[in-house]
Amino acid sequence: MDIEQALLEQVRSLTPEQQQEVLDFAAFLRQKAPVVLKKERVPGLHKESGYWMADDFDAPLPDEFWLGES
């Protein structure tokens, strides 16, 4: 038995008032953690925006950066 079948079996054994409580709680859970749909990334979408990335973007930062030294 999968979880959906087990849930339905449990809900069917409840009173109508209890079933309404379960329904209300399920609605609350959906509002609490909305499903976030991932959008497909589009390369070059904002290439005209004026932002640029330095050629040494991936280069390690010097110790002075991490130690807060000038």
Image (cartoon, rainbow, N blue to C red):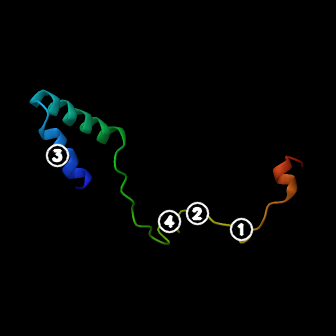
Secondary structure found at label 4 = loop
How far apart marks 3 and 4 lie (CA) works out to 48 Å
Marks 1 and 3 in Cβ contact (< 8 Å) = no
Q: Which amino acid does label 1 sit on?
A: Asp
Horizontal placement of 31 versus 21: left or right?
Answer: right
Q: Is residue 38 above or below residue 23?
A: below
**First-in-chain label (3 vs 4):** 3
Q: Position of residue 31 (x, y in %)?
A: 31, 39
The amino acid sitting under disc 2 is Gly
**In the image, which is nearer the foreground, mark 3 or mark 4?**
3
- The residue under label 3 is 8
Q: Name the residue under label 1.
A: 58
Q: Which residue corresponds to the image point at 85% horizontal and 46% vertical from the top-left? A: 68
Counting residues from the start of the chain, the first of labels 1 and 3 encountered is 3
Residue that label 2 marks? 50
Q: Measure how far apart labels 4 and 1 are at the Cα level.
A: 21 Å
- At x 19%, y 51%, the residue is 5
Of marks 4 and 2, the one in the foreground: 4
Determine the CA span between mark 3 and mark 2: 55 Å
Q: Point out the tag, 3 or 2, that comes first from the N-terminus.
A: 3
Q: Relative to residue 29, is residue 5 depicted above or below?
A: below
State left or right for residue 48 relative to residue 4: right
Q: Is residue 20 or residue 46 the one in the foreground?
A: 20
Tell me how far mark 4 sits from mark 2, CA to CA: 8 Å
The residue at the point 52 percent across, 67 percent down is 48
Kind of element beneath mark 1: loop
Image coordinates for residue 30, horizontal then vertical, percent: 30, 42
Picture coordinates of residue 37 (x, y %)?
36, 56
Q: Residue 38 carries which label?
A: none
The residue beneath circle 4 is 46
